[in-house]
Amino acid sequence: MPSTWDGKWYDSGLGDVVFSHTSHSLDGWTMSVHGQPITSWTCQTQDNADNLLLFKADQVIEVNGVKKNVFRCIKWTNITDNSFYYYVQNDIESNAGNQRVKIEDHDPSVQSWNISDYCNPSSAPVIEEYHVIVAEGHESSAKQWCPIPLLGNFTYTHNDGSATSCTSASELSVCPTWNTLTFDYTKCATEQIFSKEGVGYCVQTIAKGTTFFTTVLNPGNVTGAGHHRFTCLAISVSGNQVQISDSAGSCEAGQTATVKASDGSGLLTLSSVASCYGNCTFPLDWSSAWYDSRTRSVEFLHQQTRVSSGWSLDISNNTVPSWTCMSEDASNQLLLLKSDTVLEINGTKRNAFMCIDWKKITTNSYRYYIKTDENPDANNERVSLENHDPMVVDWNIDNYCNPSNGPSMEQFHMIVKQGQETAVKQWCPNPLLGTFFYTADDGTNQTCGNGSNVDVCATWTTMTFDYTKCSLEIFSKEGEVHCLYTIISGTTYYTSVLNPGFVDNTNYHRFYCLAITTDASSDKVYLSESAGGCERGQQSTVLQPDGKANYTLTPYSTCREYI
């Protein structure tokens, strides 16, 4: 058993238990099996690799004259040193009050049991069927962040299945701690979360689709009817409201946020008054779906200052699907994003951060850099990791936006609002302001050449290739790309261009970054391409790993003299 399992612990499943680490036993998990009491258990074997423990009841029961052993297999995960959650890896047994146990004939000659034979239920518990244990006296240290939908202050109503209360006045506060629910009973006296005092600590949350299952610990007085040490909340968001069902103890299998649980008090409907998750302001235009030169697409929720999709990262067997802005430096146009997921890496909880350096080009296009060091634990993505502390809910951006090896000037990224592709065009750089014939060199063959034609002079913002004169498709199936943004490093221009046409992300990409130089003696223009954004150190005459070819442009005429 884990080393801290000793003494009295609270258990959301079957009430208080008392562990003896020395004898690998516990008093508790009281139940009736075939009408006979089971009151204590001893651990018989374990699987350290899978955190499995096989307990056998100390009581041997008798059914129709046949003695029986009762087993309970648990799979545990630590939350803190003094709090754990576990699943019972047995089938539901109707003769044990529908508890998950395994019953078999008692054989006094058998004194050891193979754990694999006892921890393989045919109908395993669903994800919400977890239980939580917390060491007595360590209630405060068990606090964890509540799920994101609860990180705010709310008014609420409560429906017990027949009547609705708290309609005229109510207040639930989860700010500023993020870990404690506090109901103001002076505004509505209807007791919530089975708490006499109206206070509950979030101690564990597991998500299933769009529903969060959160176990709340009541640190107060649990004597008297209707008060319980634990409550499990099923939480979902509907529009601007948060819907919650409660269940005394642990969650029920199949529990939903909108249906009263069999042992629940009813349904809560929360209306937000203020949020304390996200502490900065996105650029005004950042809402809905955008194209992204780094990740193909990204979606912003402006009010929540959240990147809701598109910037997903896989970090050491964890997936981070979304990010929320926690701090900003408005004068330097910096945003600090924190992963909405708390990662677990080698048994340690971690938070992930990205620092975004942004610049507005137009209302519908922005340039950004990620001002964070590359991280080998995140496939060399630019993301920083630090140990998670549930007591910390504020981060100073000055500590996160100073990488030792940040992005080079050409490693910028572009976002363009979807549906606004023609509204973001900018002048192409001076070397491209002309009409050219061109040669494409893929490292093996050279194509096009004399007679080919690309025109930029017509608009100064769009490169238009005449595929009737050379059929090689460049950047675009339709032969047209728009210039978005250019920076200059030394004698090289780095230009992001947008393909407004067909995209398959194999042969045709939405964005390309062009490295461009000129030969002053011949007026030739040299150009390399990189799908998406520019590569570090990209050179105009070097074929890029994700580029099809290098290009040499020779002018028929220029339009630069009109600048």
Image (cartoon, rainbow, N blue to C red):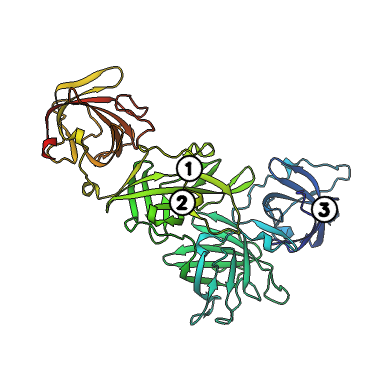
Residue 32 location, quadrant: bottom right
Q: Tell me the mark number nearer the camera, choosing from 3 and 2.
A: 2
Estimate the x, y position of residue 101 in percent, counting from the top left: 73, 53
Give the answer, above or below, for where 469 lies relative to 367.
Answer: above
Residue at 50% across, 70% down: 153
> Which numbered marker is on residue 322?
2
Estimate the x, y position of residue 471 in percent, counting from the top left: 18, 26
Q: CA distance from mark 3 to mark 2?
A: 43 Å
Give the answer, above or below, for where 184 lies relative to 333.
Answer: below
The local crowd at label 2, few if under 14, some if 14 to 19, many if 20 or more residues have their Cα within 10 Å, is many
Q: CA distance from mark 1 to mark 3?
A: 51 Å
> Which numbered marker is on residue 25?
3
Q: Amino acid at mark 1?
A: Pro
Question: Can you identify the residue that label 1 sits on?
Answer: 403
Q: Secondary structure at mark 2?
A: loop
Which mark sits nearer the N-terminus, 2 or 1?
Answer: 2
Q: Tell me the mark number nearer the camera, choosing from 1 and 3.
A: 1
Q: Is residue 443 visible?
A: yes
Which quadrant of the figure contains the C terminus? top left
